[in-house]
Image (tube, coloured by chain):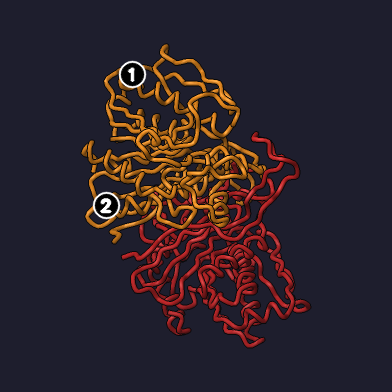
Chain colours: A orange, B red
């Protein structure tokens, strides 16, 4: 039962070219609207007060939150059924928000096997024994086809500006982020006090700490993870809202040469330091490493894994506890 | 009241790189899934038998069929309310179906003014007197931000292959096309007999005629429109289904130096010849030039114009007449 649904663009900028428009396909005197985000929203009957805004990660679009690769309902529909208005975002320079104010070149880059490893389905070509990912070939095909490229340079500032404009429009909201979306998510909450909580699934970038209090960078087989500095006045804004971070299974806490796994070892370690830092300044942040509470086999996409209803239940419990539902 | 909704990728191809995958971000031994389309579908309660599949035009995505630029319901929701399952497509190499097997470069191209003229909102910066387009600045802003670029070369063959795969999945369906989507739409119906009717809004490219029966190319202030040849056996497939084509208002039937208007003068003229050719071979094609039936002021986007409910009524009447509803 849907009361209302629709889509819009929000945020972004306008480029103007000098000269006089001459009724021709040349740049003179013309403008370009770009760097906005695209959002599709649905409002159920008798909605809860706070909508949920879902921001995808790298190489992904709003697709991340829709139907799972094995054809079940994703978080879009699960949380809609649970009574929340749901906004799905294609971030600036991705998906349907493709108009970028900065040029880029898109090469067809064969990264399926890298993604299989890095998104922790297994160690190519083998699945992890306990992985919460359906093993039908057509499921893997759907998973690979959820990948979509940047149509301009990735820019967390541009993304969080547009996200803040979205929150202005949606009003007070709960923010879900995935992976690379974690960084812009924190920045959105800094920019807009109407972000009332953040649920971050496997944040992968943009770990921000107060200036002068940065932990050491963390080398890994997948490169070095470097924390980023923000003014204390900004960092403190993250201490005013409840935050929960989830990481899944099948990566070690000790260094490994397995690139796809070592990538998450350092991210989990950095996230732990980040949660400590937020809480040290009076915040309400929590990190849930799912295997530690007995939830096994989750990939980098817990919101679409085979146990995604169980994950949604975890999130619902958190939202209930924080009186956000 | 929605029974089911979701999304998936369909069609496309797989590129494989020689060598052995070595757990690293290099191409060796890896694959790329690309050139699929992305579809989002919704099925209402008590659905009609035939779903409607909606294919967008150039510089656009499924967004074309969603909320209008002035914030009203678009054809996605209007036809859902009228009982049809609705599939919205992002074609291969566009929007959320961004993974292309062929490289491209995306330049931020300032074409707002060109689009204003070519999509017949008016003669920049003035709106046409009778235009069915809301004049609030925020409406024009939304309109410009619906533009999204190709993430690979435009290829009507790639698009119609993926569209045919979608029709295999949806089963017998009614196809709506817009603008540049017209050409791939005809090809989809040639490739798949489960396309049971086509409703084409302002087809802009891919006018196909039987080999040896091509009309003259038509020069215009916007370039020359050239018909394309297909084998008679293929052309005849278009004579087996009902087809209706709609064009809107505010372009002349005599040549003009106004680029944005002259573009549509030749397309309307070519479409008239095309309808004649289809019907000459026993087809059931109809061209509706909206001003001729007293419907004035339509832009290049009749499905989202201020009178889009009136346009939807025209389409519903056509579907009823052809017993497709």
Residue position for label 2? A83
> Is residue B118 visible to us here?
no
In the rendered image, residue B114, in percent from the top left (x then y), is placed at 57, 51
Q: Which mark is residue A213?
A: none
Gap between marks 2 and 1, in whole Å? 35 Å
Is residue A127 among what the camera can see? yes
Q: Earlier in the sequence, mark 2 or mark 1?
A: 2
The image shows residue A218, relative to residue B312, as above or below, that is above
Q: Residue at x 53, y 45 (%)?
A: A98
Image coords of residue A131 (percent x, y)? 48, 44
Q: Secondary structure at mark 1?
A: helix
Q: Which residue occupies 60% across, 28% down?
A: A257
Query: Could you tell me which chain the residue with mark 2 belongs to?
Result: A
Graded by Cα atoms within 10 Å as few (under 14), some (14 to 19) or many (20 or more), the crowding at tag 2 reads many
Residue projecting furthest to the right: B212
Q: Are marks 2 and 1 in contact (CB under 8 Å)?
A: no
Q: What residue occupies the far front of the structure in this picture?
A: A129
Q: Which residue is mark 1?
A: A233
């Amino acid at each position: 039962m849907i009361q209302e649904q629709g889509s819009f663009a929000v945020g972004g900028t306008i480029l103007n070219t000098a000269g006089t428009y001459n009724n021709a396909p040349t740049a003179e005197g013309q403008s370009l609207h770009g760097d906005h985000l695209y959002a599709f929203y649905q409002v159920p009957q008798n909605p809860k007060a706070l909508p949920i805004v879902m921001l995808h990660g790298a190489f992904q679009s709003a697709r991340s939150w829709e139907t799972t690769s094995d054809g079940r309902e994703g978080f879009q529909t699960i949380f809609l059924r649970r009574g929340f208005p749901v906004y799905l975002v294609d971030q600036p320079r991705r998906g349907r928000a493709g108009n970028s104010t900065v040029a880029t070149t898109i090469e067809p880059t064969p990264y399926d096997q890298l993604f299989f490893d890095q998104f922790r389905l297994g160690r190519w070509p083998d699945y992890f024994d306990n992985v919460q990912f359906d093993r039908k070939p057509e499921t893997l095909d759907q998973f690979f086809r959820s990948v979509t490229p940047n149509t301009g340079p990735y820019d967390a500032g541009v993304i969080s500006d547009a996200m803040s404009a979205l929150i202005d429009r949606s009003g007070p909201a709960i923010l879900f982020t995935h992976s690379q979306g974690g960084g812009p998510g924190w920045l959105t909450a800094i920019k807009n006090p109407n972000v009332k909580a953040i649920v971050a699934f496997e944040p992968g970038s943009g770990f921000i700490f107060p200036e002068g209090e940065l932990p050491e960078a963390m080398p890994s087989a997948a490169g070095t993870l470097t924390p980023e500095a923000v003014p204390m006045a900004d960092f403190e804004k993250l201490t005013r809202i409840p935050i929960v971070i989830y990481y899944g299974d099948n990566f070690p806490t000790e260094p490994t040469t397995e690139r796809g796994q070592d990538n998450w070892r350092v991210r989990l370690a950095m996230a732990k330091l980040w949660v400590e830092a937020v809480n040290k300044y009076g915040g309400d942040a929590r990190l849930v490493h799912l295997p530690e509470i007995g939830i096994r086999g989750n990939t980098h996409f817990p919101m679409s894994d085979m146990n995604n209803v169980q994950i949604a239940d975890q999130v619902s419990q958190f939202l209930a506890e924080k009186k956000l539902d």
